[in-house]
Image: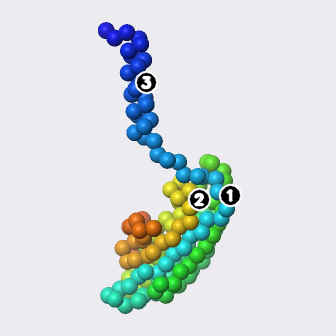
Amino acid sequence: MANSKQVTLIFSILLVLIFEATYVEPKVMICFHDVEVTIINDLATQSTPTNLTLHCKSKDDDLGFHTLTIGEKYTFSFKPSYVFWKSTLFFCSFTWPGNPDRHYIEVYKQRRDGCENREWKMIKTGGYLWGQFYPWNSVEINSISKM
């Protein structure tokens, strides 16, 4: 039977290994400046430039509808929540001619994005954020009353 010093040593090593394996670099959660989100229409269907209509919201703010031509940008800014138990989330819906669906993606999620500005390039299958692809969070049949 192992003595208490050996058990303590093994337990300590296991704890260190567990903490090391689960450590994730924390994002800065309290922002002292506004965060900017930019959305770029990079949508081209069959090599034809296509307008992109977007509608962005958070729990507290509705930013309305905006239609972007190919290559055009829409930018909005906000101050993220400074209360640690609340987290700011902005999501947008996207529609375009010739597609009956409304597509959703979270363009800013405070726990994921911290205080960093976001620049999205939207394509038919989702969006690129600094070169990393994110597929649509959800897709539903377009209905004017739900948009």
Closer to the N terminus: mark 1 or mark 3? 3
The residue labelled by disc 2 is 115
Going from the N terminus, do you reach mark 1 or mark 2 first?
1
User: Which residue in the protein does label 3 denote?
Assistant: 12
The residue depicted at 37 percent of the width and 77 percent of the height is: 124
Camera-side residue of 129 and 56: 129
Instruction: Give the CA distance from mark 1 to mark 3.
Output: 38 Å
Q: Are marks 1 and 2 in contact (CB under 8 Å)?
A: yes
- Of the numbered discs 3 and 2, the one sitting upstream in the chain is 3
Which residue is depicted at the point 43% across and 31% down? 16
Residues at marks 3 and 2, CA–CA distance in whole angstroms? 35 Å
SS at mark 2?
loop
- The correct choice, above or below, for 145 with respect to 18 in the image is below
| One can see residue 53 in this view | yes
In percent of width and height, residue 100 lies at: 39, 81
Q: Dot 3 lies on which element?
A: helix
Identity, as a three-letter code, of the amino acid under mark 3: Ser
State the residue position of label 1: 32
